[in-house]
Amino acid sequence: MSERFSHSDSEDRGQQEASGFPTRREIMRERRLREAEEARKEQRRIARQKRREAESQGRPAERRPTQPPLRDSRAPHRATHHSAGRREANSEQRSPIETYDPLTTGTRSRRVEVERARVRKRRRNAKIRTGVTIVGVIAVILVCVYIAWNAISSNHQSDVETVDYPGPGHGSVEIVVNPGDSGAVIGQNLVEQNVVKSQGAFLQAWNDNAAANSLQPGTYTLMQEMRAVDALAALLDPANRSSNAITVPPGFTKAQVAERLTDFGDFSADEVEAAMNDAEALGLPDYANGDVEGWLAPGSYEIHSDDQPVDVLKRMVDGMKAQLDDLGVPDADREELLTKASILEREVNIEQYYPKVARVIENRLTKPDAETVGFLNMDSTVLYGVGKVGGVPTAAELNDSSNKYNTYKHKGLPPGPISSPSEQALKATQNPEEGDWLYFVTINLDTGETKFASTLEEQEKNRAEFDQWCEDNPGKC
């Protein structure tokens, strides 16, 4: 029976050693070692407790010999008492359990290490599987986004083709861009002229082009059935813009403005006259008494192919209203200011003299006891009344009291403005230079040199200089 068990133990030990796990004998030995260590720990604990009790009572602690370690019952008994004592002494210094830890050394440690390696491998494999899964999910998402993007792009391209012409276009048509027109208004006009297919396509091109807001008013020649982006590019090209502008210089009368509009080619004299008499359409205020004179602001005005005379004239009236608004002129004072400034504009052609001549006008109007006794005595008003815009009035014209604008015969201001004053003339009339001048005369019509006087005697000397210039320059006076 003992041989059979011995043979079985031998086979078990061989199999366990081959498999890397501890044998039954090794496990029993480890168990006995643990029990011996626990007994020694308990003995040492009891001994420490007794020493602490003795020290607290003031007597030396009793030292009891430690119990020798348990011996393996199957170990041989050939050891002598001396060797046993030596082993006991060595055990006090270094016990077998302190030099041998079955959990970290020997066969058991190899088993634990194998288990740890398996755990690390499982964790590593789990991380790899997680990474592969994440990469796969991202790849699937990217594929889906790519497919969706292609579908959207295809639909967008299809939508663009349905709202826009493929271009490049054909034929020609004139497009008018008015001041203040928005992209939506321009786009609608282009649709109506069949230049672009839809307003939406043009607005998209307008919003995508940072230069769109710099588009200038005017008349443009474009093709029909153009792509929206090409149509906008053509509008931004100055080469496609027709320059149809008229200029109204400062001092122009309404008759001169009408003549310039008529000469433009598309307006007849009757159309222009009718427009000037349409006070309501022009937006004239009631205190203008239906007369557009003085309300046509000087400047340059673009005339579009679809403009009517009243459209152009209204822009001039609006321009003068804006100037008076900027200068803060009350409604009750506007007609008077325009009248004074219009006389100033016709009397002086050099800006530096504006404030002085404005003071002469004020002094003549506000000082009835002065030598001029309330008469303006302005040649420009007399000439306006007889339908002239330059030169010197004749003696007969100066003596004609039927001329309501003859300020030599009628005191105070004439019935209304006599020209279109500039902004500089308006400002000078509002703030005339301080002085006591009552007279002035331009002694050189070529250079505009003007002299001022406070008395009639001084004025006669200055006028003599003017007469001499006229003799030296026949045909200019």
Image (cartoon, rainbow, N blue to C red):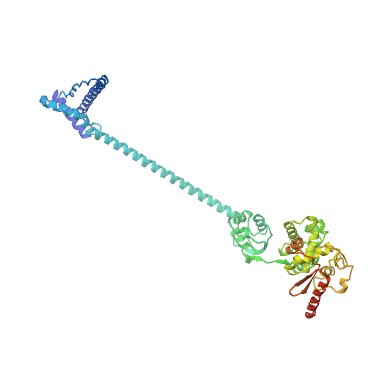
Judge whether 25 appears above or below 125 on screen. above
Using residue 290 as the reference point, say whether residue 204 is left or right of it: left
Using residue 436 as the reference point, say whether residue 20 is left or right of it: left
Using residue 195 as the reference point, say whether residue 248 is left or right of it: right
Of the pair 423 and 249, the residue shown nearer to us = 423
State how many labels appear. Answer: 0
Residue 181 spot, x, y in % from top left: 67, 57
Task: Examine the image and state in which quarter residue 180 appears.
Answer: bottom right
Residue 312 spot, x, y in % from top left: 74, 62
Of the pair 381 and 168, the residue shown nearer to us = 381
Q: Quadrant of the N terminus?
A: top left
Of the pair 303 and 11, the residue shown nearer to us = 303
Using residue 446 as the reference point, say whether residue 385 is left or right of it: right
Task: Examine the image and state in which quarter residue 396 appears.
Answer: bottom right
Residue 67 spot, x, y in % from top left: 18, 22
Judge whether 335 appears above or below 379 on screen. above
Q: Quadrant of the C terminus?
A: bottom right
Judge whether 134 appears above or below 285 on screen. above
Of the pair 454 and 473, the residue shown nearer to us = 454
Task: Examine the image and state in which quarter residue 319 appears.
Answer: bottom right
Judge whether 75 appears above or below 323 on screen. above
Q: Residue at 83% across / 63% down in the picture? A: 365
Residue 65 spot, x, y in % from top left: 18, 22
Q: Is residue 324 visible?
A: yes
Q: Is residue 257 visible?
A: no
